[in-house]
Image: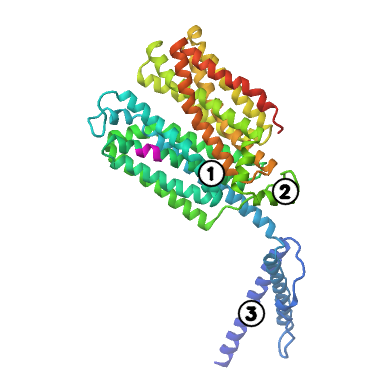
């Protein structure tokens, strides 16, 4: 029995020695593969064990080796905690948060445009249905009022959205606008009269202003000028995706589920997006980027941070470069606003195209917009952004020219017109929004939100004024004259953008 017990004790000690030896080797290999570490305070180190009487030399060697390696391991842990390798981890964390921010904004813009365009194949059926949901008499006038209500409310609420974003934060503005968009979509499901539909459409326009202002401000605050263009381009790809998918999804769901279930499902999707925004902002809040290339140094930057909202708005409205960018946004969307209704008339009267074929032709603009937005965003990080905005103006002017050339070259000229229109919108969207953020940084204006609010006003104003002026001239002098007159504004603004310093 004594011999068996002795053999068991010796085997147990051998196992302990082997385990300890393997532990020492693993720690040494891990430390040898890591960067050199600095010496930390000795209070956390393990004292070297003394050689005990009766212990073998191998036990003493293993005890001392394990103590040395564990001390080096503790030094490394202390260095990580004190910040020796914290900068690399922070960069990785900031990069991941920037990707989450872009995904957050892209999803919000996708849902925004999806809700706005789902109505395109549905609203004619709703308005021409029997009262009280539909209208009696002039249904075309009711449709015009319905579609104009979105742009009017968006234009009116854009300054309010800018103030809300400036007073709170882009995170809060984006979250509240997404919730508002979901509630407005729910009203479409439960509406029983045309005026309730009109109210819901106006609420969608108001929420859309806050989504755009809050989303673009969030990207501008979390990205530097070097990668801001590609981030905005990727985010606006969500906008183009919603524009591309909205009519198709709306038509299919309306046929299968009906009006109420279609918009109930859409409202649930938007509110789930708002919940996802809340979760992401809670667990990985975006980190604000402090612009390092603004003129004037630290003192001016501090003054810009303390600038009041009134002073920031005054500086914004007196800055020629920012007004030039806003004017280019107005001109581009004015041409879009003219071509959109005239294209339906031209395709019907001059070419005799069916409604399905018309939808396919108009989708050319959506596809080119979807493709050009991320590409132009990436290009804007590598070349002059004012030149890209000038290029978008030139493309839109060419679109107006090809619209007029349809009488000579037929459908091919019209298809080129539609493709150039979508490309121009994609190039202008990412480059102009990035340029606005650059101008805010350069001139120390203060808040990005008011600059994006001004851009949203110009966007909506172009979609309102463009059709009014263009259609008036088209009735007097023919369809081409109205488009060419508004397109001439793009030619006039091109040298203005070329004079802006990159």
- Mark 3 residue element: helix
- Mark 2 residue element: helix
- Locate residue 268, reporting x and y percent: 36, 47
Query: Label 1 neighbourhood size at 10 Å, few (<14), some (14-19), many (20+)?
Result: many
Q: Earlier in the sequence, mark 1 or mark 3?
A: 3
The residue that disc 3 covers is: 14
Majority secondary structure in the magenta region: helix
Q: Earlier in the sequence, mark 3 or mark 2?
A: 3
The residue that disc 1 covers is: 162
Estimate the spatial distance between the alpha carbons at disc 3 and disc 2, rounded to whole Å: 71 Å
The residue that disc 2 covers is: 300
Magenta region? 199-203
Mark 3 near mark 2, Cβ–Cβ under 8 Å? no
Q: Quadrant of residue 120?
A: top left
- Locate residue 137, reporting x and y percent: 26, 24
- Mark 1 residue element: helix
Instruction: Farthest residue to the top: give it.
Output: 408
Mark 1 near mark 3, Cβ–Cβ under 8 Å? no
Q: Quadrant of residue 458?
A: top right
The colour scheme of the drawn protein is rainbow
């Amino acid at each position: 029995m004594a011999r068996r017990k002795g053999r068991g004790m010796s085997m147990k000690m051998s196992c302990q020695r082997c385990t300890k030896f393997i532990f020492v080797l693993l720690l040494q290999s891990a430390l040898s593969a890591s960067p050199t570490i600095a010496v930390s305070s000795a209070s956390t180190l393990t004292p070297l064990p003394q050689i005990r009487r009766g212990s073998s030399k191998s036990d003493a060697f293993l005890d001392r080796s394990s103590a040395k390696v564990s001390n080096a391991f503790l030094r490394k842990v202390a260095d990580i905690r004190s910040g020796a390798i914290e900068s690399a981890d922070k960069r990785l964390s900031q990069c991941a948060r920037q990707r989450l921010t872009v995904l957050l904004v892209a999803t919000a813009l996708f849902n925004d445009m999806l809700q706005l365009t789902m109505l395109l194949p549905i609203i004619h059926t709703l308005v021409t249905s029997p009262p009280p949901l539909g209208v009696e008499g002039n249904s075309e006038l009711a449709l015009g009022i319905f579609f104009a209500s979105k742009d009017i409310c968006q234009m009116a609420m854009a300054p309010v959205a800018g103030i809300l974003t400036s007073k709170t934060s882009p995170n809060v503005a984006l979250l509240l606008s997404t919730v508002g968009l979901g509630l407005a979509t729910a009203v479409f499901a439960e509406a029983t009269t045309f005026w309730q539909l009109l109210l819901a459409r106006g609420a969608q326009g108001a929420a859309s202003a806050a989504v755009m202002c809050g989303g673009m401000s969030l990207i501008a605050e979390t990205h530097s000028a070097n990668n801001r263009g590609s981030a905005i381009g990727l985010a606006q790809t969500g906008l183009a995706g919603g524009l591309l998918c909205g009519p198709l999804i709306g038509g299919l769901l309306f046929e299968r589920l009906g009006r109420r279930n279609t918009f109930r499902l859409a409202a649930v999707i938007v509110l789930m997006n708002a919940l996802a925004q809340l979760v992401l902002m809670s667990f990985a809040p975006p980190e604000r980027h402090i612009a390092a290339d603004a003129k004037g140094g630290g003192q001016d930057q501090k003054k810009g941070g303390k600038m009041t909202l009134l002073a920031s708005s005054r500086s914004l409205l007196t800055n020629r470069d920012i007004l030039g960018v806003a004017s280019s946004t107005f001109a581009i969307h004015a041409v879009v606003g003219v071509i959109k209704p005239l294209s339906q008339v031209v395709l019907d009267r001059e070419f005799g195209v069916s409604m399905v074929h018309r939808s396919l032709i108009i989708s050319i603009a959506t596809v080119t917009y979807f493709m050009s937005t991320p590409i132009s965003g990436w290009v804007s990080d590598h070349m002059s952004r004012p030149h890209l905005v000038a290029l978008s103006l030139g493309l839109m002017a060419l679109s107006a020219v090809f619209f007029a050339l349809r009488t000579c070259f037929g459908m091919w000229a019209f298809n080129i017109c539609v493709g150039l229109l979508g490309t121009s919108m994609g190039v202008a969207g990412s480059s102009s929004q990035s340029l606005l953020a650059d101008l805010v940084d350069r001139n120390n204006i203060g808040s990005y939100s008011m600059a994006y609010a001004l851009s949203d006003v110009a966007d909506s104003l172009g979609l309102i004024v463009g059709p009014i002026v263009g259609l008036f001239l088209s009735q007097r002098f023919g369809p081409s004259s109205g488009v060419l007159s508004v397109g001439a504004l793009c030619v006039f603004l091109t040298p203005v953008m070329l004079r802006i310093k990159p």
